[in-house]
Structure formats: C-alpha cells, structure tokens
Amino acid sequence: MILLMTTAPPSNAPWFHGKRLPPLGLMYVAAALEQAGHEVQMLDNYLMQQSTEEVQQLVLKLHPVIVGITCGSATYKKCVETAKAIKQVVPGCKIIVGGWHASYMPESLLETPEIDYAVMGEGERAITELAAFIVKGDYFGASTVAGVVCRGSSGVIKNEPKFLNMDEIPFPARHLLPLEKYDRNIEFLKAKPADVMSISRGCTFSCGFCETKKLWGNINRQFSPQRVMAEVNDLVAKYNTKGIYFINDNFTMRKNQTAEFCDLLIKSKLDLEWVCDTRVDLINQEILEKMASAGCKTIWFGIESGSQKVLNHINRNITLEQVEEVFKMCRKVGIQIACSFMLGMPSETKEDLMASYRFADKLDADWCQFNVFIAYPDSPLWREMLETGKYTQLDDFLYSYKTDEFDYDELMRIQKQFFKDYHRAPKRILKRIQREGVLNFAKRRLHPSPVDNAGMA
C-alpha cells in the first residue's frame, strides 16, 4: 500500500493559502500509481491539518510500504518533521518527497536521513517506476530511475528527469479525496460547484522570479483538446461540475489548440463557465471572441509591476501599453479581468511600488491582488539577492528583497495599505455590489475569507 500526502501548512506563515483547493499534482501521481496496480490512499494534510500524532496513528494503521510527500519550500520544515515522525512508527517504509522543493533543491531533502528519495520534475512516471523497484526490493534499480535523487555508495545520485507525453497521464484521482471539504466555488465565476483543472506543463519564457522549468521543463506541453474535453465531461458526469478554473499560467500559449478546445466546448452544449490564466502577449481579439463564445467569464493576468523599468529587469517581456490594450479587448468581448502585482522585487524602489498602485488603479480590473515578492529558490532573482546581500531571510530557503527604503515588514504594511485603498474605492464597492448582490456583499464583509484578506476581493 502507498500513502500519498501533503504536509500541514507552516505555522503562522503569511504565505499560507487560505483557499481550500485539492492538490492536483498529487492526484495525478495517485492516478498513475493506481493505473500501475498499486493500492493508494491520500491524506491532504494541508487541508485536514492533522497533528503529528494523528499522522503517526494513520501510518500505523495503514502500514504503507511507501509514503510520498509533496513539499514546497514554505513547507520544508513540516515535510522534514513529518518524515521523521513517520519513520519513528514505521521505520521500514520508504519515504519519497516530490514537488517544487524537490525539483529546486533535492539535495537539501536528503540531508534528512529519514527521507530516502527525492523526485525532480514530473512525478507520475518517476514514482511509478520507483515504486515498482522498491516493492521488489531492487534498490539499485530504484537508484537508476529518471528524476530520482538518492544516496549512493559514492555520494548523492542525481538522475535527470524525463518529461511525459501529456495524454499518457490519467485523470486525477479525485475519488481518493473528500471533495465536499474543498471550496468548490471560484471567486471569478457565478457557477457552482466549480473545480480546478490543469491542461499544460512547461514554460518557454524566462521571467526572473520563476524557476518552473525545473519542475515542468522549458517546452510548453499540453493535453490535446480531446483529452481536455474528456476530463471536462468526466467532471460534469461524476461531480456535477458547473464551472472550471484552468489553473496553468499560459492557457493561450498554443492558440490553435485553445480554439479547437473552445469549439469542442461549444459543440458539447454543456453551458459551462470557466476562467483561465495567461499572459497579455498571448492574447488577440480573435481568440478572445472564441473563448467568450465558449463560456470563458474571467481571465487572470500576472502584470507584476506598473514600472516598465522593473518589468524589464525581471525579464517579463511585456509593456504597460500591451497590458492596457489587452484589458480593453477583454472588456470589448465581455470577459472579466483579474490581475496581480508583486511588491518588493530586486531593483524596485518605493516610487516603483507607487507606480504599480497607480497603474492598478488606472487599469481598474474586476479583481486585483497585491503580493509581497518571495523569491523561489535558485531563480534568477533569488540568486541576484544572494549575490547583492539585499534580502531578509524569512525561512530556510525563502527570502524577501531589502533596501534602504523598505524591508519585509514595510512591504507587508504597504501591501495592506494598497489592498485597503484599492478595494475601498467607491467605484469598486459599487462594482462588487452589482456583481455579487447586496446580501452576498454584506455577508463577505461581515465574514471575510482568508482569500479576501489576501487581496482577492
């Protein structure tokens, strides 16, 4: 038996995600393991927040051969604590850690003796092959699997990952999690219940704040439009889904495939609402019209800064003029706009921060979020911060930019002020009342969610 799990969120950390969404990546791995014939159980402890003792009781009950843990840099300490606790009660099980941190800094995980393997990149094939070797007791074979990092007789063994043909990946194992405990509603959609889907992996861009290529590769790979439509039909049939958030960064990277999927959705007559994320330089009027016809209600854009100087420094490769033009095109076809800005990136000054606020105010998106920049390990901006010494260390691997004008605490104060000033503007209060209705607006003001407080109003 194999247990796959997330860790509990970091205690009192400002980057805790209040929105309760199922762990898609882990569900894909679970589905691949089930397809290979393994018995699999899942614990989303980011949601359930079970104590160490409760996790130990579960492991004792299940007595798994393998425990797979997904780990981000923000949950590194929790991951290590969990691995140690599991080995205390079932010392013979093998612990495999995957996810973002395992792809960025796998050697740091192997500093913990209780962690046997780290997996870089996509987990579906790597963990399935690794599990087959472990179950047979073939630990030499396990050490040869692509993407696996482990200890060897002469030091750390690190095998380069290989990337999959996307259509080989089975639908996520949603049946292994209690979906009723998750937030099956999306702020940007009226339709309920709403769920999340992934349609692509890999990125061809080189933004300085991101190191997603280490996880997914530098080529954008997508499920075929037919495969995406099949999963949509599965969600509708099994879970009564009425709305979908396609959560990948670059939904419109391949416009021909986007258009083909939209045609399939229109032909299906499912009357589905959906939202996606993309870049302003991956949009044109023709594809927007097609998306609107297929039920797209909102697009999320990462703008990041209202200063062209900062956008150039972080290698965003977009212009402020492009942003304004695309927002006009979205409004023309009736698609709502959500966007986000990052505060406190290398090279940024207080005047740049104010430029971001002024630009956000000018754009007047339907939703706007301001996030304090935290550098991804081994990303270009992370390396720049280490080289210049201009940072505040927040955790083992997490850093915030620091200058003579601001530090992390000041950035948090500015973020709260921007959020308050932006969302309390009378025109935006009126817009929200029109969008949500008076009762729903009042209810959210009386009982704000963690997501509201984070900036998604």
Image (tube, helix red, strand yellow):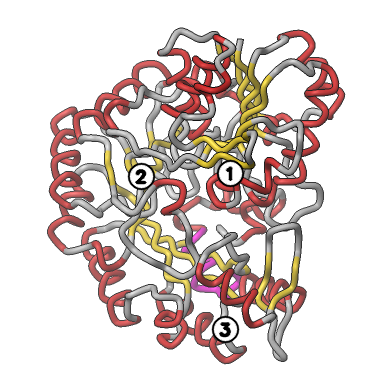
Q: Earlier in the sequence, mark 2 or mark 1?
A: 1
* Viewer-side label of 3, 1: 1
- In this figure, which residue is indicated by the disc labeled 3? 353
Relative placement, left or right, of 225 versus 2 is left
Whether residue 428 is in magenta: the answer is: yes
Q: Are marks 2 and 1 in contact (CB under 8 Å)?
A: no
**Magenta-drawn segment:** 421-432
- How crowded pointer 2 is (Cα within 10 Å; few <14, some 14-19, many 20+) is rated as many
- Where on the picture, by quarter, is residue 122? top left
**Between 53 and 100, which is closer to the camera in this rendering?**
100
Q: Which image quarter holds the N terminus?
A: top right
* Viewer-side label of 2, 1: 1
Q: Earlier in the sequence, mark 3 or mark 2?
A: 2
- In this figure, which residue is indicated by the disc labeled 2? 201
User: Residue 102: which disc?
Assistant: 1
Q: Is residue 176 above or below residue 52?
A: above
Secondary element under disc 2, as helix, strand or loop, is strand
| Residue 252 pos. (x, y %) | 25, 53
* Viewer-side label of 3, 2: 2
Relative placement, left or right, of 190 versus 219 is right
| Residue 448 pos. (x, y %) | 68, 51
| Residue 369 pos. (x, y %) | 54, 64
Picture residue at 59% right of the left edge, 20% below the top: 178
**Between 443 and 206, which is closer to the camera in this rendering?**
206
